[in-house]
Amino acid sequence: MIAKDGHRSSPVLLAICVLALLVFWFGRYIQTSSYDLVQHFLLVDELMKHAGIRPDAFQRIGAMALYPPAAHWMAAVIGWIGGSGLVGITIVLIASVYLCYLLIAYLVGASAPANVLLFSLAFLLLRFTHAQVGWEIVANFFYPQIVADVVYFGVLLWVSRTRQGWKQSFAFLLAGAITMWIQPLVAVHILAVGCVLMAFQFWDEWRKKTVHRTTNAVYVIVLVAGSIAIVLTNPAFKVMREISANDGYLVFGYSHIMLVALLCGAFGVFNLRRHLIGRAEYVDAVLGSAVVAAVCLTFLQFALLKLHGDGSAYAVKKHMFIVGTLGVMNAVRAIAAYLPVCKKQLTPGLVAPLLAGFATLFILKGYDTPVAPIVRAMAYANHAVDYEFAGFVPGNTVSYDSSLPPMGNVMISLTAFQHTFDDRAISWQRGASIKDGSPYAMIRRTPAINKKCGQRFAETENYLIVDPTCLRVYLLNERLSFNTGGNGWNYASTGWSGGGESWGSWTLADGGVLALSLAEPIKGPLELSVDGMVFVTAKHPIQRIDVLVNDVNIGTWTYTREAPTGERSIEIPESVAHSGNLRIVFKGIDAVSPQQLGESADPRVLGLGIRSVTISSAVH
């Protein structure tokens, strides 16, 4: 008996070990490609600090105050235990992706070698589409949706093993009601699956003229009526319907969304037919009903958009994560049914955790921004607000740590420094300078900062709170770097492409602007040196860059295919720089984007790619 119990516990232990390894590896990182993470963290931070959502929360965190909070409570609880709600979000989403694929593996058929092989190949071949379950939190950050997906696939697995109608109806209604507080879109999918599956079973029983026809009809009626009541009475559904009108960036690896949905639905119909004629298992009826329901909801959302302007293309695409995954699952089971049966079966309890871990590794490999520096900076910001910075009032301070990704500074400014989530905060997400217009800024201490910023309102060994105008003070011969976290961003204003890359940053065609104040009086002309490059090709062999200082064009640099990169220098006359305040603009003449030339899908009109900038005295 002991050995038998130990054998049963082995798959559970393996699943826990795989999940623990995933959390250990990816829990140290976050993704910084979608500012949706900032908005979801606002709600987690509200829950952690106040153990609930305060009545005035809408004024500070916007629509997130009305968002279904269940997934955020999970992150908040982990945050209370571990000290960081940001890490809590990451742990919940890692577990959610893993559990989704663990459940999917069982539904696909983890004991059948052909099913496992086909699903693995399909997952690898289709990963470029970024349209399978799990990708919700990679390019975008649909955090509650991936958490709700766990409930969705869990219900499908449970129902596939429970044929009693009343239990199924109750399970769908209960799961739908609970998921409304996680993510209403997935809740509607759960209820829709139940209605389609129960209707299909009723039709099958009616066709066979069994004695259970009347009972099944009652189950269908109860489920439909209960689903309507849950959807219409839950306030979360109304909120999500309003949010669905916001269009956003969501790109898949294919263009014809509705055609793909139809193809996925066709596999579901095929499996339902196979079940009707006795050539498929009951799990095929469940999966077939699920994808048919999902496709119907997608077309309903599409019709509402086209006929009534309700929702957005963004809202239509959100359905496709479930649709695409179910389409693959149905296709795998349909194709595997026509392959030779392998007599040797796999152990599901061993295969499923490994398959789920394999899928999760692929999905989360883009998580490579360390979270620890953001957590440390946020901890100091909270400490300064509570104990150290006497001049603080909500919204008068921002985080401007150049070593952090822009998203990290936005998070800290909105949470620890309690800046309202308003139009100005939204402009930060679009590249506006976070320090402009702020009375105070929290910055990282460096030797150069110590020289420039004498007045400090709070400080530790690593951080200072200062008047941000001191950050524009420039020491001659200081090399300004424009890679990610470079010191040049203290001086950057408009016209730059994001917050830098590993090599530097592009200015845009209208001109990347640097604004600085010299720390020393001007004695003669200055020399401006730039290590940069341009985008030139056979179709665009020459790129000219006008250099303007204080609205005076001091010269033009010409780059060619033969000399597209390198350091260029130009003299700034004393008459132009005598005030000590310099506004430097690098303006691309006849600049084009890679997309215009057919080189790539990059739509940015690229000016000058800058690695570093140095200003020195021209008098030697």
Image: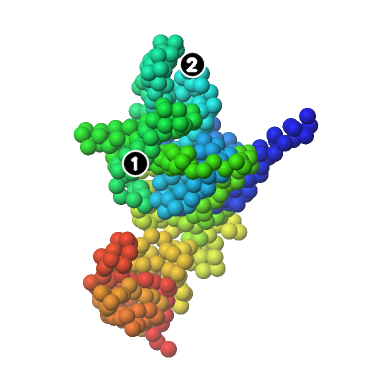
Residue 209 pos. (x, y %)? 40, 14
Relative side of 573 to 478, left or right: left
Q: Say above or below: 407 vs 158.
A: below
Q: Amino acid at mark 2?
A: Trp
Front-most of residues 538 and 13: 13
Residue 567 pos. (x, y %)? 40, 81
Q: The C terminus appears in which quarter of the rendering?
A: bottom left
* Other-residue count near label 2 (Cα within 10 Å), few / some / many at <14 / 14–19 / ≥20: some
* Other-residue count near label 1 (Cα within 10 Å), few / some / many at <14 / 14–19 / ≥20: some
Q: Residue furthest bottom?
A: 620
Helix or strand or loop: what does disc 2 sit on? helix
Q: First in sequence, mark 2 or 1: give its number.
A: 2
Residue 459 pos. (x, y %)? 56, 56
Residue shown at 39% from the left, 30% from the top? 273
Relative side of 501 to 93, left or right: left
Q: CA distance from mark 2 to mark 1?
A: 32 Å
Q: Amino acid at mark 1?
A: Leu
Determine which residue is flagged by label 2. Answer: 166
Residue 550 pos. (x, y %)? 28, 71
Residue shown at 66% from the left, 39% from the top? 11
Relative side of 1 to 467, left or right: right
When asked about the image quadrant of residue 351, the answer is top right
Q: The N terminus appears in which quarter of the rendering?
A: top right
Residue shown at 51% from the left, 60% from the top? 403
Front-most of residues 424 and 438: 424
Q: Say above or below: 210 vs 57.
A: above
User: From this viewpoint, is residue 515 visible?
Assistant: no
Determine which residue is flagged by label 1. Answer: 263
User: From this viewpoint, is residue 270 visible?
Assistant: yes
Helix or strand or loop: what does disc 1 sit on? helix
Q: Say above or below: 518 vs 354.
A: below
